Image: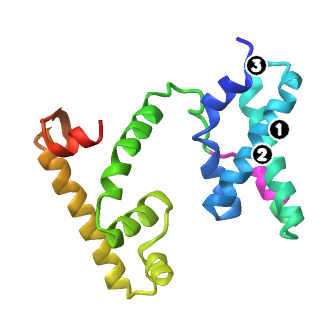
């Protein structure tokens, strides 16, 4: 199979960001670097001679892009370079079926309108913690509230979402409490999100 930019993006788009984040520690910056990686992949796709080595090729471009960024920020050192080359990121399942990623995307897209419908202080807390990856302590600092206040906002936001979802759908659970089935009920919130 001859890989294209699109096929490589489908295979790797969701798996590279955690590796990039391990070196730059900013979600927005990781997104920028990942975008640069895929621009380079697109520009250099013709240099990929062996499709069986696509994973190592993409990883090398990713490493070089991160190192370029670190050099520009004067954060580059030989120790960083060596440890990046030694570290083999856990990307063994990069080429696996995309069903899980598509399901996560579908769930995320379904939750966004629900989260936005919450009172602003809960909506903001959920968005910052669940989607932007802030800890509750970081949330407290960002919003200039107490750690217990941040924890309370996140918990109340989650409860409001859960209550809405429980009223919106009928869930089937196994004996361990794991969801094994969901059946949508007709309600006003479901109609709004269609």
Residue at 84% across, 55% down: 67
Residue at 60% across, 35% down: 92
For mark 1, give the secondary structure. Answer: helix
Q: Which mark is residue 69?
A: none
Instruction: Tell me if 120 is positioned left or right of 180 in this view.
Output: right
Residue identified by numbered label 2: 36
Q: Gap between marks 1 and 2, in whole Å?
A: 6 Å
Instruction: Tell me if 171 is positioned left or right of 91 in this view.
Output: left
For mark 2, give the secondary structure. Answer: helix
Image coordinates for residue 25, horizontal then vertical, percent:
65, 65
Image coordinates for residue 26, horizontal then vertical, percent:
64, 64
- List the single residue furthest toward the top: 1
Q: Is residue 14 above or below residue 99?
A: below
Residue 84 on the magenta segment: yes
Image coordinates for residue 151, horizontal then vertical, percent:
32, 76
Residue 130 on the magenta segment: no
Q: Nearer the viewer, residue 96 or 7?
A: 7
For mark 3, give the secondary structure. Answer: helix
Q: Is residue 16 above or below residue 182?
A: below
Residue at 34% across, 42% down: 110
């Amino acid at each position: 199979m001859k890989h294209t930019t699109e096929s490589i993006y489908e295979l790797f788009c969701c798996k590279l960001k955690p590796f990039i984040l391990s070196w730059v520690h900013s979600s927005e910056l990781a997104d920028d670097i990942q975008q640069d990686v895929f621009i380079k992949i697109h520009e250099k796709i013709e240099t990929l001679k062996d499709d069986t080595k696509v994973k190592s090729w993409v990883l090398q471009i990713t490493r070089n892009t991160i190192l370029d960024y670190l050099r520009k920020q004067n954060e580059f050192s030989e120790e960083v370079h060596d440890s990046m080359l030694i570290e083999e990121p856990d990307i063994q399942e990069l080429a696996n079926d995309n069903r899980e990623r598509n399901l996560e995307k579908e769930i995320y897209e379904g939750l966004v309108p629900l989260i936005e419908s919450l009172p602003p202080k809960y909506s903001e807390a959920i968005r910052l913690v669940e989607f932007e990856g802030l800890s509750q302590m970081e949330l407290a600092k960002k919003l200039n509230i107490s750690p217990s206040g941040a924890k309370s906002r996140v918990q109340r936001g989650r409860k409001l979402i859960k209550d809405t979802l429980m009223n919106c759908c009928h869930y089937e659970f196994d004996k361990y409490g794991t969801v094994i089935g969901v059946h949508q009920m007709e309600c006003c919130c479901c109609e709004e999100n269609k």
